[in-house]
Amino acid sequence: MTKATLAAYYAAVAEKMLPHIEDRPLSLVRDTDGDLQQTFFQKHKLPGMPKAIHDGQLEKMSGKESRILWVDDLAGLIAGVQMNVLELHVWGSLRQQPNLPHRIIFDIDPDEGLGFDDVKQAAIDIRGVLEALGLQSWPLLSGGKGVHVVVPLVPEADWEVVKNFCQDFAELLARTDPSRFVANMSKARRKGRMFIDYLRNGQGATAICPWSTRARSGASCAVPVTWDELPTFKSASAFDVFTAAALAQECDAWEGYFDVEQTLTERIRKAVR
């Protein structure tokens, strides 16, 4: 897999990817040796970085200043390729509104003994609970082993409100179906079950950006799919850069995602406590 191949991939998916990444604080996963054996996370500017990857700062809810990176166009994505960036992880908020998240993510992280059928069914069940609360959601094949259930929000509630809701939601699933779900990240407690990772919903936490490549053999990608399509896939890494690039030329699987106007009302928050 060459840099030219990756640059061509991002050119092919940019139209669909940029609305999910532009102006959002980033974490980058970079490869140092070309064989995926030594990768590292980067959240701040380092010497020699291209100008297309922007550097700045923002003030968090805690009052502390935080240095951030962001991109806002295809040039930024390709600059990342030149720097051996293999994954792009994003905040759930814009840098201009850092205290107000635009989305929720529930990352379904299964125990090693579980198959992808278990993960898919869990995602579908989570969708059902969210619908009962009045919240629409969309599924993302993570490019790894799990599925992300993504819930867009109007940016009104702050990070504390959103994270508390997500924790309450995960704990509700763990209470009502303890044979399948846990809300504790401990590997020991996860035996034979799935961890509903709500921790990606705190300020400064990141999740893989839709259409990002993954730092994995096989050049898998994180790809948005429809709920109708989800049951047909055999793994969360069903797409590589070639099949994902082709998919990006078709209709948007997340049509309507950016048009949904939903908020975490007091009624919704109380329903999961």
Image: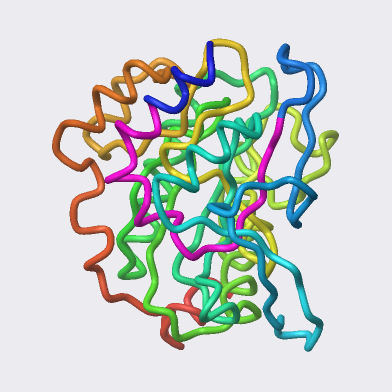
Q: Is residue 243 magenta?
A: no
79 left or right, relative to 200: left
Quadrant in the rendering for residue 28 = top right
Above or below, comparing residue 77 to residue 174 in the picture: above
Q: Is residue 160 or residue 43 the one in the foreground? A: 43
Residue 244 is situated, as x and y percent measured from the top left of the image, at 34, 24
Residue 103 is situated, as x and y percent measured from the top left of the image, at 46, 65
Quadrant in the rendering for residue 79 = top right
Above or below, comparing residue 35 to residue 182 in the picture: above
- What span is in magenta? 9-30
Residue drawn at 57 percent across, 83 percent down: 158
Above or below, comparing residue 260 to residue 10 in the picture: below
Residue 207 is situated, as x and y percent measured from the top left of the image, at 59, 49
Above or below, comparing residue 159 to residue 85 in the picture: below
Residue 261 is situated, as x and y percent measured from the top left of the image, at 27, 75
Residue drawn at 32 percent across, 36 percent down: 13
Residue drawn at 55 percent across, 73 percent down: 95
Residue drawn at 77 percent across, 46 percent down: 185
260 left or right, relative to 236: left
> Which quadrant, please, contains the C terminus?
bottom right
The mark total stands at 0
The structure's colour scheme is rainbow
Q: Is residue 23 magenta?
A: yes
Q: Is residue 167 or residue 10 the one in the foreground? A: 10
